[in-house]
Amino acid sequence: MIGFVLRRFVNYVLLSAFATALGYVLASLTLNPAARFLGRNPPIPQASIDASLRQVGADPGVPVLTRLWDWSLHLLTTGSLGISARGTEVTADILAKAGTSLRLLVIGTVLGAVLGVAVGVWGAVRQYRLVDKVTGYGSFVVLATPTFVVAVLLMIGATQFNNAVGSQVITFTGEYSAGITGSTWDLLKDRLVHLLLPTITLTIFAVASYSRYQRSAMLDVLSADFIRTARAKGRGRASALIQHGVRVALIPMSTFFAYSFGLILTGASVTELVFSWNGMGQYLIDSISNNDINASAGTILFTSVLVLISGTLADVLYAALDPRVRI
Amino acid sequence: MSALDPLTTTAATTEETGAAAPSAPRVRRPGVLRRTLAARQAQVGLGVLVVVVLWAYLGPLFYPWTAQQSDVTAFGQPPSAQHWFGTNSIGQDIYAQTLAGLQKSLLIGFIAGPAASILAGIVGAVAGYLGGAWDRVLVWVIDLLLVIPSFFVLILLSPLFKQLSWVAMVAAIAAFGWMVMARVIRGQTMSLRERDFVKAARFMGVPTTTIIRRHILPNVASLLIIDATLGVGAAILTETTLSYFGFGVQAPQVSLGTLLAAGSSAAVTRPWLFVFPAGVLIITVLATSLLGDALRDAIDPTSGADRA
């Protein structure tokens, strides 16, 4: 099992490294860091433009692959992603923003996975009953809706709720109310209320997609012989379904968790942007409008590391669930 | 976004098809179309889709306002007999704009979705049929593209969409929408390769490209058709999300995404700016996914309706 997980881990590390390199090259090809200095009045002398470009490692005279090599070497030796267009350290910027994104991501993923699996199993066990139909068509509708539409609809709902109640019960712009003071409890409560709508948005999508795959995986298992054997040995229906059924049905899901993480990440960035959270989604968009190569490549590195972690976790889960891997 | 991808079949099928070689290849059955159309879900999906397409292209012919025109006597008006979906703050008609945006979004979806499926078919068939080094390299590329969050890369590529046109965006959306299906096709091809009719062709000296074109691709066509159908909806969702944040279709042109972006800030005070385009979008994507899902039920006996 350790061998299996290690092999997969090394594979993920290689994939992340390539993904980051690809991100750096793409950013170098599409972004033009010199654009910030052009069209100024009085014009900035070419020499100082060159000097500041060299400082961020974006000297147009140097081939892209050489720049990529320097950047990667710098990253590996010092752990620094270079200087951003605003003169700050990209690594520090990302560490500061990552918490915001991670909070949303972790809560959304865990809630979504747990609820999604539960709803999927429920739908499979009650196939063709009302519950199955409602959850089935519900997830169809959710998956046909862009994330931002759900977010905006939730905002409209919250506004109307606030108007009906007559006070700002649900606040949803940013991570916390500007200039709020008070006890730790007040601060925490304020953050939790701000977390409410973004979490609902993200969870709705995760539940909709996980539940459909879980239902399908569970249906494959329900008619399997080992369930009948377990029942014949005198296991209760619930215990046979949960201990034998759900466990086996989770095996293909663990692969899906790894692949779907990219979707959740996208959903989280969109959610962040709609609710004006200052996370990695916002950071990427800022870095593109600033023509900032180092910051864009850093964002791609951040996301590939997340995919690396989630992929490895999914493999550990897979190895733990599937006895054929556990040697 | 690409949540509509048939990952069900992947999660389970990638491993299974490799192992259960002899029984796996699905031959096209004459009854597929009939069985698909017998399902009410497919009838609804197809019917709605046809109506939406006809509406998008014929609707503007029977309506006095155009998308760019602005009515100086009606600024920010709610829906009325004159402006069916209301007007925005500069008097542009939302019904006309929604239809124009729908045309663009449908065009993008109907190009990018099938294009991704064609790419998936070619890459999957080549990897599965040739095997060896080709297979390892292609699978690695597939894995690489799967770990890169496509939304971020599409944003990164967006300066190109601004320079070139929305066609570049269509290509980019297709370039990030084929990987999952390519893995499924690869698994199917690996089992097809061992079947007698393919072996016979190979031993008779039929060139590899001909075998792939004439024997492999027709046998995985049903999967590709499902994927293309579901891909239309997924591509439309990607496009609207990109356009919503200003990275997709650019200003003088409208898509449903740009319309929603313009309408969302006023969504509370003037809901018609947001609700109508959003409703049209959801109905369109829903129709493609209902149709795709019904196709999958009809073609793949292990999924959906008929199983125990």
Image: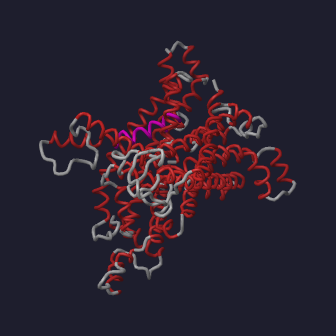
User: Residue B77, can we see it?
Assistant: yes
Q: Position of residue B274 (x, y in %)?
A: 42, 47
Q: Nearer the viewer, residue A1 or B275?
A: B275
Q: Which residue extends farthest left?
A: A182
B136 relative to B289, above or below: below
In the picture, the quarter occupied by the C terminus of chain B is: top right
Q: What residue sits 55% from the left and 64% below the top?
A: B168
* Residue A214 percent location from the top left of the image: 51, 33
Q: In the image, is A125 to the left or to the right of B293?
A: left
Q: Nearer the viewer, residue A109 or B107?
A: B107
Magenta stretch encompasses residue B236: no
Magenta stretch, main secondary structure, is helix
Q: Is A299 situated above or below A130?
A: below
The answer to whether residue B143 shows anywhere in this view is no
Q: Which residues are magenta?
A: A198-212
In the image, taking residue A195 as reference, residue B5 lies left or right, namely right
The colour scheme applied to this rendered structure is secondary structure
Relative to A224, residue A52 above or below: below
